[in-house]
Every structure is written in structure tokens, then in C-alpha cells.
Image: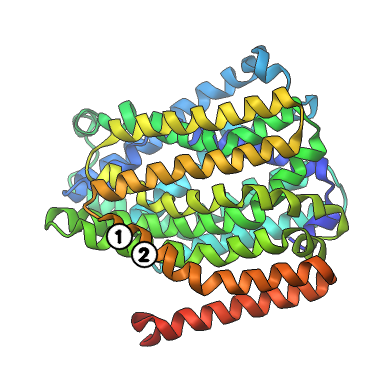
Amino acid sequence: MLVLVRLYPKEAWAINDYVISLVGVLAPVVTLRYEDALMLAEDKRDAAHAFLLACLSTLVFSIILFFLLPLSFELEFMSRAPEAVRSWIWIVPVVLIIHRVSKISELWLIRLEEFDRVPIGQVAQVSTMVVTRIGIGFFSSGPAGLIIGYTIGWVANLFAFGSRVVNSISDALGEGFSFDRIKYIAVRYRRFPAYTMPAAMISALGTRLPVLVLAAYFTLETVGEYGMAIKLLFIPLSFIGVAVGQVFFVRATAAFRIGKLSDISATIHDRMVMMAIMPTLLMIAAGPNLFEFFLGEQWRGSGEMIQYLAPWIFFTSVASPLTRLFDVMERQRLELIINIAIIAVIATALGVGIYLDDVTSTLILVGVSGALIRIVQMVTVLVMAGVDMLSILYPYTRYGLYASPLALLVWGISQYYSPFLSTVTAVLAAFCYVALVVVRDEYLKDQ
């Protein structure tokens, strides 16, 4: 990232973020969320057919989107999108196919409990993406390098464990592919396309909508700064949330069957708060100085944005793996209702910000309202899983007491001293927090 921000301008990052946001919003649509069925199916042959159903759905709907997406720019809102975005709209369905088949393959490996293989694909994806972006960036500073690098990265992810997935799917099919079994899976798990898919799409839209709206009503430079702010906090935390959520889905499904769901849910919530609270508080305390030190003075605006958005990012990240509980308990209808409320709140905040015609006000409204509605979502699903309110509040009290004094020190330093000293203090504070958590945590102390 330190190299990439010096190779590509804010406008190139903005176009890249717009394209990736469309991929993120449409990802749940093309699979109809049938990939979740392969985790719940008790029979491995049914799980293999669920895998094939999700991949087939991805291919069919991505082809349809290839023709429909260009027409979407005739709509009033989409017509406001920058002209530079439209020339890249064709690549969205291509990325969707590669991205979704890769993620479905990851879920298959997790079902097999081959957890060690998943990081191999992730390392291949990230390293290939970065090398490709840097290589192209030396010759062109346009968005091509960023978008092509992102696409090739997911190709590398797929190839990293493709042969293992193909072989294990073939073994699981046993007697071979059955179209009747595909139809059975489609009907048996019809709640996924009926409720989980729209809920997931709305949830994705809730986090991606600001990029689409900022691009329509403000400048590409603003979008680029916003996207960079999200990358440095939300993406690392969401990466942890997705990884935890995948394993949690498997464990929670088994725990639900034996009546132990509340225990594992409380533990995952505790661990997510533990991991997310310190980086969030450090960004609030010294975001502008940290961004200036690592990325350069031109990105200081992103550090100011992250201070407003951090509460929303924090609670979104903590809630992320816990939302799998809706699928475990087959409460997809409630998940859909909550996600509709989330997008309504975020859209309202954005609408008020646009009316005020002020970027800062828009981001403050999104940060505060987004945090509040995510708290509602998180508390709802935890209570539903049998976790009591004291257990829900305890991690925030415990880890907040560890992290807050350290973050306050960093804030004080950032008010009067250089970005370098602020960064050094922030790094030391992070190490102190980790040491304090390890010493006070019996499980971590024994590892």
C-alpha cells in the first residue's frame, strides 16, 4: 500500500472503489446465497450439489448482468456516476464469476475443515494483486492497474486450491451429478434466495452505498479519500470478521444442535471486541497523523474521515461473524427485516448529508447512525442466541478499560507533536494493549 498510493492518484482509487463496490453489492445476488447450503447440508453429496448449484447460479446471473449493467446507467441515480466508471462496467460480471467461485471454494474447504489451505489462497490473492498493481503502475497511473490487479488476484486465489476442490467435489458426488438432486437442494434451501440473498445484498449495500453516493454527488477525489479511509481500517477488520465467521458458521451449527449456541456466540463476540477496539480507538485518536505518516500528506483527509466513520466500522466488524447466527437458527426473515432497517438508516443519513451539501456532515451522520443500527442488529442476534445482556456489555467494559487510557495518551501526543511521534506512540500503545490482554487472558497466556 505504501508504494501503491504513490503510483496511483485519488481519482484512480475512486474508480477502482466504485467498481469493487458494485461487485460487493452484486456478489450475494449471483449465487442466490446457495453457498450457505453446502455448510448446512448433513450429507456430503448434498453439499457437493449445493456447491455446484451456487457456481451454476453465479455463471447464469453474471452473464445476465453483463447485458443489464450498461442499461442501469439510464436510471437517474446511476446516470450521475462519473463517465470514467462506465468504461469499466463490463468487467464487473467477469470479476463476479471469479470472485464468487473462489469464495464458494473456500467455504467447501472450510466444510472439510481444511482450514490450513484457505490462507494459502488468500496469500496468493493478495500478493498477486499487489505485484500486478505495482507492475502496471510503473507504466500507467490510471485505474486499469488497480482493477486488473484486483481481478488477477482472485484468479490466483482460485488456482491456489482449485485442484483440491475439484478432486474433493468429485469424491463427494459419489454416484455422479444428479439434476434431480440440484432441484431438491434448490427447494430444500429456498429460504436462502428468498431471505438470505436479499438480506446479504442489502447488508452489502449498507457498507458500499457511501461510495456510490459520494461518486454521484461529490468529487472523485472525495471518493478516493473515503475509499482509502475504509481500506486502512474496515477492510483489515472485515477480513478478520469473514475468516472468523466462516469457521464460526461450522462450529455454531454443531453447537446449535447440542444446545451450546450461547456459549460459542458470547466467546466470538468477546474476541471480536478484543481485536477491533484498539485499532479503532487509535484511528479516532490520531487518524490524520497516522495517514500522513504512512501514506503522505495528500492522504491526511482520509485520516480525518476515519475519525468520523470509526464507530460504524467498529460495530459493523464486530457484528459481521455474528450475523451467521441468523442462518444457523434459520431466522433469515428477521435478518432481512434488520438489514432493510440498516440500509434505510444509512440511506437517510446520506440523504441528509447531500441536502446539506457537506462531506463532513455526511460522514458524521453515517458514522453515528451506522453504529447505532449495527448495535441493534448485534444485540438482537446475541439475545436470540441466548446470550444475556451482562455478557454482551462485559467485553466493552473490559477491553475499553485496557485500551482507552492508551488511546487517550496517543490523542494527547497527536495534538501537539509530529506525525512521526504520534505514530511511534500509537505503535507502542498497540503493543502495550496486546501485552495487557495476553497477561490478563488465561487462554491466550497459555498459548
Q: From what the image shows, is residue 266 above or below residue 175?
A: below
Q: Is residue 201 above or below residue 291?
A: above
Verify CB contact (< 8 Å) between mark 2 and mark 1: yes
Judging depth in this view, the residue of 144 and 423 nearest the camera is: 423
Instruction: Residue 155: give x, y in percent of width and height.
Output: 57, 50
Question: Looking at this view, is 12 or 447 the one in front?
Answer: 447
Q: Label 1 belongs to which residue?
A: 390
Left or right: 437 as drawn, with respect to 149? left
**289 lies left or right of 177:** right
Colour scheme of the picture: rainbow
The residue nearer to you, when weighing 35 against 384, is 384
- For the N terminus, which image quadrant? bottom right
Image spot of residue 440 (x, y percent):
41, 83
What mark, if any, has residue 223 been given in the picture?
none
Neighbours of disc 1 within 10 Å: few (<14), some (14-19), many (20+)? few
Residue 150 percent across, percent down from the top left: 65, 48
Say what secondary structure mark 1 lies in.
Answer: helix
Q: Amino acid at mark 2?
A: Tyr
User: In the rendered image, which quarter contains the C terminus?
Assistant: bottom left
Q: Which residue is mark 2?
A: 394
* Residue 70 screen position, x and y as percent: 65, 19
Residue 169, compared with residue 445, is above or below; it is above
Return the residue found at the far left: 258
Tag 1: amino acid: Leu
With 428 as the anchor, is 34 left or right in this view?
left
Q: Residues within 10 Å of mark 2 (few under 14, many from 20)?
A: few
Q: Secondary structure at mark 2?
A: helix
Q: Residue at x 71, y 44 (%)?
A: 226
Where residue 414 sits, quadrant-wise, is: bottom right
Q: Based on the displayed image, in which of its 4 quarters is residue 418 positioned? A: bottom right
Residue at coordinates 60% horizontally, 43% vertically from top-left? 367
Between 163 and 432, which is closer to the camera in this rendering? 432
